[in-house]
Image (cartoon, grey):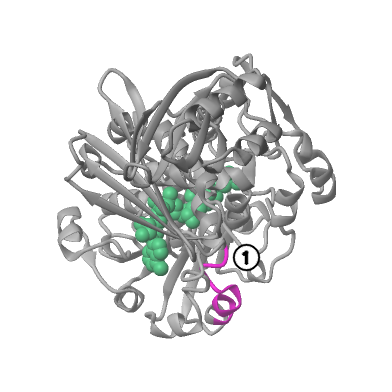
Amino acid sequence: MTFKILIADPISEEGLHVLRTTPTIHFEVATDLTPDVLGEQIVDFDALLVRSQTQVTRELISKAANLKIIGRAGVGVDNIDLDAATEHGIIVVNAPNGNTNSAAEHTMAMIMALSRKIPQAYYALKNHQWDRKKYVGVELKNKTLGVIGLGRIGTEVASRAKGQRMNIMAYDPFLTEEKADKMGIRYGSVQDVLKEADFITVHTPLLKETKHLINAEAFELMKPGVQIINCARGGIIDEEALYEAIVSKKVAGAAMDVFEEEPFLDHKLLTLPEVIATPHLGGSTIEAQESVAVDVSEDVIRFFSGDLVRNPVNFPSVPTDIMNKIEPYFHLAENLGTFLIHLTQDVIEEVNIYYSGDLSEMEVAPLTRNTVKGLLKRYHGDHVNDVNALYLANKKGITIHEHKTSKSRGFTNLLTVEVKTKTENRRVSGTLLNGLGPRIVKVDQYSVDVIPDGHIVVIHHQDQPGVIGRMGNLLAQHDINIATMQVDRADIGGEAIMLLKIDKHLDEDAMNELEKLDDIYHVTAIDL
Ligand SMILES: NC(=O)c1ccc[n+]([C@@H]2O[C@H](COP(=O)([O-])OP(=O)(O)OC[C@H]3O[C@@H](n4cnc5c(N)ncnc54)[C@H](O)[C@@H]3O)[C@@H](O)[C@H]2O)c1
Ligand SMILES: O=C(O)[C@H](O)COP(=O)(O)O
């Protein structure tokens, strides 16, 4: 099978080497497509690779019937509608580490250029003006750099600025005073940073909470003569408010690599001599571009090979050591979900998943996703996957609860899935037997021992002599061979269950005829 990848933004040729040398991958580069043309072409592709330019909107995603993965060769994913991707079961991966260094270096370059007015002086000189008075700068030494957002890039910037003998004060929701002490920086609230810094640099993602984080009120709090740097995302700083703050001389200068609307050719801020700017170049180095292209290409290949991706954005990543422990339970979890949904007649309202014995000590979230995927597969087919299983369940109003207990009724590990509807509670349990593989060991109150694969028929019947014979004869008339059979009952002569493994799918005619036999109440055919 060949997977088709569309590369819609300029991505390093060298970094794509890994795609070029994978025989199952075919990729096409088509940059600068209009949204309409991209919308027409996307249906042919299994994967889409972008940088920050291509807008991967809900509308585009809705046209991408075959799309399985979106790779962002870089960090910011604000050009990708993550909710729409998740709803469509499309995994989004990025390359969060590849351009950290370049973005931090670019930020430092901007801080230094800003403090010494290098672009303005250069521009004047190019225009035949030798003016030494106009371009007097300020030193960085002993000035306070306020860092808002101390993640990968913020941390690198802080460490480099210390090399310039700057004092660093930072705010990040995950920064504690203790951590700050260890890093040799000062911890402060956003307000503290705004009030005390001589230079303020933002390094957060653009989120609802960070949109216009630096606005007119924030400028009010700042020291006169403060200088502002944005090499993170346009929109974190309110550009209109920044313009006013510069005109009113509250802000002495600003260095901008990113803007609320990109790309542009004219911008109000660029009419101000205090503003220096680059066209979103933070990650634009040969090294960073190669690195992000390699990272994202490798994740796409991992995904198509059925391996775990390293940098999922809309899907929690599972560390390898945890994955190694839970991987053997993946199929069991999915098959128990699929098995149970076939036994359930009514609309599911609640799912309880009980992890017992060894399983109670494991990180089970991926197993929960697989169980829910198994449950929903009956009605969503291939449209449900690990990415959107919980989302779809939630949208259907199904609540999912995980429970853990060390008690596992004699099994080393036991996974029990229970569904509740308005009219019934159904449950199925499975285990992984050492050396023997997965088994279904309980269906409702009945004990069984069935390998959860192939064609399974569940027959609810009355515990009476002759039922098994009649059932066997009927299946023989339909040329259906029984491979294994398990029977259990509540009481002698009471309700009972039969689990048959048969060698082919039980068709509807055979099923209806089985249900008409004396003492048989209900027949369910399950193909796992
Ligand atoms: N200019 C460029 O070319 C370029 C290159 C790379 C990255 N970026 C951008 O730089 C930014 C930072 O990237 P990163 O790799 O360091 O990301 P990161 O996820 O490592 O760090 C972001 C930090 O922001 C913090 N944060 C979130 N909300 C906050 C809030 N309300 N106030 C303060 N801090 C908050 C987070 O806790 C996190 O520590 C992103 O917006 C990214 O898209 C730009
Ligand atoms: O978020 C990022 O990685 C940077 O903004 C770089 O964006 P780019 O890939 O468009 O240069």
Mark 1 crowdedness (10 Å alpha carbons): few <14, some 14-19, many ≥20: some
Residue that protrudes farthest toward the front in the picture: 465
Q: How many marks?
A: 1
Query: Can see residue 388?
Result: yes
Q: Which residues are magenta?
A: 234-244
- Identified at 74% across, 59% down, the residue is 265
Is residue 188 placed above or below 281 in the rendered structure? below
Q: Position of residue 311 (x, y in %)?
A: 45, 39
Secondary element at tag 1: loop
- Identified at 61% across, 30% down, the residue is 12
**Mark 1 lies on residue:** 260
Q: Position of residue 44 (x, y in %)?
A: 77, 34
- Identified at 60% across, 16% down, the residue is 22
Q: Position of residue 135 (x, y in %)?
A: 50, 64
- Identified at 29% across, 43% down, the residue is 363
Left or right of residue 499: residue 14: right
